[in-house]
Amino acid sequence: MRAMVREEYGAPLEPRDLPEPRLGADGVLVEVRAAGVDQGVWHVVEGLPYAVRLAGFGVRRPKRPVPGLDVAGVVAAVGPAVTGLRVGDEVFGAADGAFAQFAASDPGRLARKPQRTTFAQAATVASSGVAALQGLRDAGRLRAGQRVLVLGAAGGVGTFAVQIAKALGAEVTGVCSTAKTDVVRSLGAADVIDYTKGEPAGQWHLVLDTGGARPLRALRRLLTPSGTLVIVGAERGGRWLQGTDRQLRAGLFGGLGRPRMAALMSRVAPEPLQTLREMLDDGRVTPVIDRTFGLEEAGAAIAYMRSAARTGKVALTL
């Protein structure tokens, strides 16, 4: 099979011919039709922050040469213990080494692909869509009728969060740059704030920060006394804590006093995938894809995903 590989952290991704992944008894082999590109992929490719390496990805060099997590495709084979999926099923979710023609997963990280979505759209859901859902519903305890502020509303998680919050009955305010205000409004935001012209002012029941750099103290001032601040991530913090520094502080001090703070550690699992599948199938949520790239353009796709020009998601198509 064709796959994108790097043997060292920070090395360019290069196309290689590799054997197909081997399956265990409960394994699922997915013929990849599309793979999502998000910040998590960049962290794993670069090995940053260093905590990523200590989390099991390999201290000196990557344990898995093929990166990629979010996937959509067709089941090519299943292990003898798998009962919920069959060869030929169209699926989406997460898999190991999604930047390849075939990737291995298990039934707990896959769901049947929504009929209304393309493979490219479905491939962008697992990381960003699940993070948005769990950030709003679980960590944020969102209830219908509440007011929600989404910071980074035009980003990968943000475009899902605006739509999911509205689907859950919230009144949504989105924060983004000038060029992206129309997109955020089209997703269902009742109000859109252009951060180049001024900072948010007011109080919300829930503030979901999907990757900004605002101090936690300033964010808490945007909450009602019983409100909740949820930190999804941020690309700050240096080589040791990049993307995690504010999450760690929110987790450590979030339970002290009011309003509360919560750090999100999202997890791809059957229930959130099924909930998102229903929202995608009935049209309440539609993935926003800025650009698609071919498999061998994976390096360019990651670079574009990290650029300020990008709106929504980026995907590889095979």
Image (spheres, helix red, strand yellow):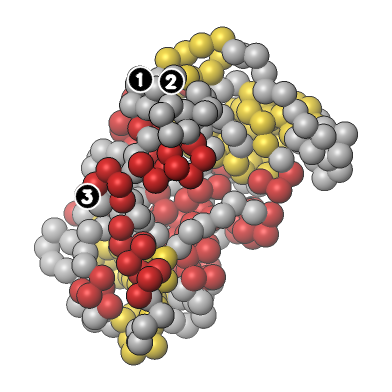
In the rendered structure, which amino acid carries the disc numbered 1? Pro
Q: Mark number for residue 12?
A: 1
Q: Earlier in the sequence, mark 1 or mark 2?
A: 2
Q: Looking at the rendering, in which quadrant would you find the C terminus?
A: top right
Q: Nearer the viewer, residue 305 or 238?
A: 238
Residue at position x 60%, y 28% from top? 33
Q: Earlier in the sequence, mark 1 or mark 3?
A: 1
* Circle 3 residue: 179
The location of residue 79, given as percent across then percent down, is 82, 32
Q: Is residue 212 above or below residue 200?
A: above
The location of residue 81, given as percent across then percent down, is 86, 39
Q: Are marks 2 and 3 in contact (CB under 8 Å)?
A: no
Please tell me how crowded label 1 is: few (under 14), some (14-19), or many (20+) other residues with Cα within 10 Å: some
Residue at position x 53%, y 27% from top? 64
- Distance between mark 1 and mark 3 Cα atoms: 31 Å
Residue at position x 54%, y 70% from top? 138
* Circle 2 residue: 6
Q: Residue 14's image quarter?
A: top left
Q: Are marks 1 and 3 in contact (CB under 8 Å)?
A: no
Total marks in image: 3
The location of residue 173, given as percent across then percent down, is 33, 70
Say what secondary structure mark 1 lies in.
Answer: loop
- Distance between mark 1 and mark 2 Cα atoms: 6 Å
- Distance between mark 2 and mark 3 Cα atoms: 35 Å
Residue at position x 43%, y 34% from top? 59
